[in-house]
Amino acid sequence: MKVEFAPINIPLRRRIQTVAVLQWIVSFLLLAEFCCGIFVILILGNFWFVAVLYSLWFYFDWGTPCAGGRRSQWVRSWTIWNYFREYFPMKLIKTSDLNPNHNYLLGFHPHGVLVCGAFGNFCTGSDFKNLFPGITPYLHVSSIWFSFPFFREYILSAGIVSVSKESISYVLNNDGGGHASVIVVGGAGESLNARPGSLTLSILKRKGFIKMALKHGAHLVPVFSFGENELFKQVANPRGSRLRKIQEKLQKIIGFAVPLFHARGIFQYSFGFLPYRQPIHTVVGSPIPVKQNLNPTTEEIEQLHELYLQKLSKLFEDHKRNYGIPEHRSLIFE
């Protein structure tokens, strides 16, 4: 394999952008494990009392990820996130106003490998706040991430909360409105399909978010992130293959998928774990009004689910030409 190295005279700003994305990748892949290691070292070392005090805090603070989290505007506004978004670059696009008197459930598609667009647009900077004043977004992720000591404090500060029913209900129960639950509908399993050109969404059996929207009267908003699947390549893992079976079994055991992805490096463009510099355009669709129904029937859930699929497809079709997707390509639901 021929290695393509980066030019020496790259502007400093682009170098800083690369460092910003590198720290995010390292945080995503290794920070949780590193924090666990620090915790063990504290227990076994002279500072065991710090681990004991933190354990007490951990115990009494256990429910916070399901109770709106503990966001820090300071963390969300770090300058490094500006460079992070510039790297791709990343842009949030508004198609309709969101009335702050209502609560919303935003369905984010696709998952991609590392949910980059969801993190960048809903957990950093002020773009969402400027486009949708009066709306506070909460990105819901797997509860397992809040089991790691110290790491949980970091992701909580970014406005990330648990994807449990309890957590979603807490966010959507805001009487005054102005809350938006952001749910990556395809879940971790969809990441196993993430590769350049893929338009396959795992959604046909995903109806829990529809039921939650009905029970809380939260308006549904489809969101499609163009470019999300273009950031990484992935080792071939077609359904039924040995690798895919291992990945699916691991997902059931540990609670999240393990896609074998690769892209570019720091000083060369041929291999590595940094994402490609591909534009990400996250388009927020128009809200689908939902009337509260505390006990929705299966038929009512199916009807709203079908309407959501139609609106998501329309959002994609209306904008795909703007982002280089051929006219004959359409979303595939599975």
Image (cartoon, rainbow, N blue to C red):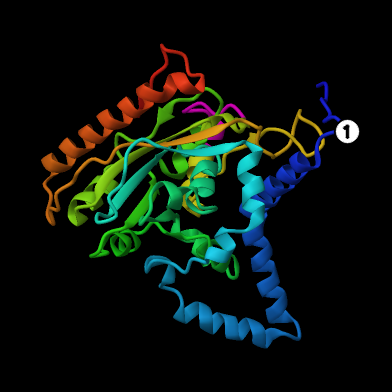
Give coordinates of residue 42: x percent, y percent: 70, 79
Q: Which residue is at a point 61% across and 33% down the rendered structure image?
A: 232
Give coordinates of residue 258: x percent, y percent: 56, 43
1 in relation to 174, above or below:
above
Q: Quadrant of the N terminus?
A: top right
Decide which of 104, 248 is in the foreground and name it. Answer: 104
| Residue 41 shown left or right of residue 231 in the figure | right
| Residue 140 shown left or right of residue 244 in the figure | left
Decide which of 18, 144 is in the foreground and name it. Answer: 18
Tag 1 residue: 8
6 in relation to 166, above or below:
above
Give coordinates of residue 177: x percent, y percent: 27, 59
| Residue 329 shown left or right of residue 303 in the figure | right
Q: Quadrant of the C terminus?
A: top left
Give coordinates of residue 164: x percent, y percent: 36, 59
Decide which of 142, 284 is in the foreground and name it. Answer: 284
Q: Which residue is at a point 48% across and 18% down the rendered structure image?
A: 325
The amino acid pointed to by label 1 is Ile
Give the magenta part as a residue range: 235-246
Q: Which residue is at a point 31% across and 49% down the rendered structure image?
A: 105
Q: Secondary structure at mark 1?
A: loop
Figure disc tally: 1
Residue 32 lies in the magenta stretch: no
Q: Which residue is at a point 72% across and 85% down the rendered structure image?
A: 47
Q: Residues within 10 Å of mark 1 (few under 14, many from 20)?
A: few
